[in-house]
Image (cartoon, rainbow, N blue to C red):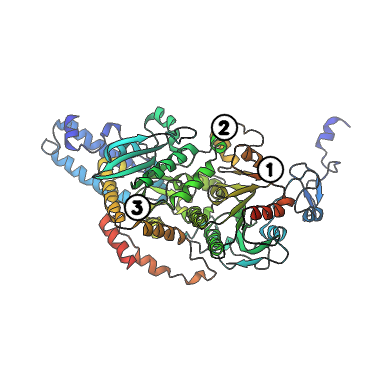
Amino acid sequence: MGKKKKANWNGFSLKPRKEMPEGLWLSCPSCKNMLYKKTVDENLGICTECQHHFRINGATRVEQLVDEGSFEEIAADLASSDPLEFTWGEQNYKDRIKVDPEQMNAHEAMLVGKAFIRGRGVMLAVMNFDFLGGSMGMVVGEKFCRAVDRAIAESLPFIVVCCSGGARMHEGLVALQQMAKTSAALARYDQAGGLYICVLTDPTTGGVAASYAMLGDVIIAEPKALIGFAGPRVIQQTIKIELPEGFQSSEFLQEHGFIDMVVHRKDLRSEIGRLIDYCGK
Amino acid sequence: MSEMTENNQNEIAFSSRQYLPFEESVAAIDERIEDLKRQGQTNSLQGQNAQEIRAQQVNLTALLKQIYSNLSPWQTVQVARHPQRPILSDYLNLLFKDVRQMHGDRAFGDDPSIVTALGQIGSQKVMIIGQNKGKGIKEKVVCNFGCPNPEGYRKALAKMKFAEKYNIPIVTLIDTPGAYPGIGAEERGQAQAIAVNLMEMSRLRTPIVCIVIGEGGSGGALGIGIGDRIAMLEHAYYSVISPEGCAAILWHDGAKAPVAAEALKLTAKDLLKLKLVDSIIPEPLGGAHRNIHDTVYNVERYITRTLLQLKRVSLDKLVDDRYEKLRNIGVNCARAMETTPQPKAEKQLEIPERLSIEAQLRQKEMERI
């Protein structure tokens, strides 16, 4: 019964098991507590212990943000035409983007539609991280522009909730040019005098950050979201220095003057409503 | 040495030439010609080895033609990154007259990796904006290897606004591996700087011509890359992500970059077929680095012609057309993607191996009709 035997013993352990029955429990990446998923969902996807904001998918976001049942989706049936005919290994992009209409991720990486937030009519665009990391391809660009066109036509405020890793690699330069396309559409919207509010959530990086996410008349961010141009891993590989604590977080960006306010998820609705009132729209 | 420079002034001297991995056979012939010249001690047209030299030169031409007419995408990337490829400072020296560099973004500092300068091309005044990679290690470090910081983009925008005010057309020469990913760059808002450039360039009331002269690296390239005409040099590349980055994400292995380059469709020909660039500017045989003067001449011809075209268009129409062009990128996304008339498009845009600028322009005219 020496120490040696104990070290090799890998049967029962008193440490909590890392793997939990799927879908019932969550582990909070911030405070490491085990959380009952249903409680978190009821709490708008926020950790009840440490207020960590979990990522939520597009449909849930819409549900949380708008007045009940007021969301009218437009341009829902768009799909990418796979301009590059992109393949890698045995996989190809065309199969990857085939969506199951039964599932929640059937909305590509962005949902757009007309809705009411606390009784104020808005055009709303919400990014869906569940679909290929919320990456921006031709569909996102096109939906975005259609929403802007509609917002101009009906002189509505335009609200975008960003949650994306950047431009979609599988669409190559077509995806990159969507940065230009969305920014150009916003230039038109700006000239038409529209109010544009962006809500940045975790994560907003790459091509999305470097286009419409940073062009808001008002830029709001959720607490502790990762926001930046290059991802932290890329930066670390390039400069080979340990990155400071809180680098590229919402608070960091606010400190450096790129964000108007950091708003808790539960206050988002009222805050947007108030901003719209201030701008007289 | 003297007869050699006399012979072909424009070519880079043999002694300092650098070869890419797939150019081994070219290097061998080059060396052979050089040997023969040295033995003959005379001009290649008369001396004792003249016959042999001429034969070798014919070989060389054929070989270069063969190699460079079907470069793989990865080889194109290598050519675009060739250490001797002409960079912005070459164009500033050879292409533009009376260049006046303008510095500083009036807020933070001056970023040497983006150069903004007033210059003249023929009798036309232009604002030149481009990324400078620098020559030699010292200058490369100063220029951050052509990776701009936010102040570079803000400087570019400030100078573009200046050009707009005085009705000076803008020429941007794009050559960057990407915007710089560093702590300082993030602190000063790299994303915001690029975003504002995209928005403002799309409504700038002056003609803009963009030319990718080497590497078109993602957002860093797009940050000064919105214009009325987008052209690429024949062996330049323009991509949403570097092939190495793409390979690291998809295969978890940077060594798969050649495959990634293939999949990303980043060469000028592919992008012309996708209608993302308007024209390809031909490079001299063996790539821009073999004959800088010819390259610069081709670029000059393109800029002059294009500016003449753009000056005839009213500013309102120019800005509207620019917006329409951007708006139509990736517009045909629908569920019914099987019915896209692909064969027809392919036939229209079939490009011969080496297409003259005139032929391209004619082709574009045809498309418009």
The circle on residue B70 is 3
Nearest to the observer: residue B274 or residue B228 = B228
Disc 2 or disc 3, which is closer to the eye?
Answer: 2
- Circle 2 marks a residue in which chain? A
The image position of residue B148, as x and y in percent, is 46, 38
At mark 1, the secondary structure is loop
Q: Which residue is mark 2?
A: A240
**As drawn, B336 above or below A19:** below
Measured from the top left, where is residue B274 in percent x and y?
42, 59
Q: What is the three-letter code of the residue carrying label 1?
A: Lys
Residue shown at the point (43%, 41%) measured from the top left: B158
In this picture, residue B85 sits left or right of residue B47: right
* Circle 3 residues within 10 Å: few <14, some 14–19, many ≥20: few
For residue A120, what is the image quadrant? bottom right
Determine contact: label 1, label 3, CB under 8 Å. Answer: no
* Chain letter, disc 1 residue: A
Residue B217 visible in rendering: yes
Which residue is disc 1 drawn over?
A224
- For the point 65% across and 42% down, the residue is A250
Q: In x, y percent, where is residue B344?
A: 38, 69
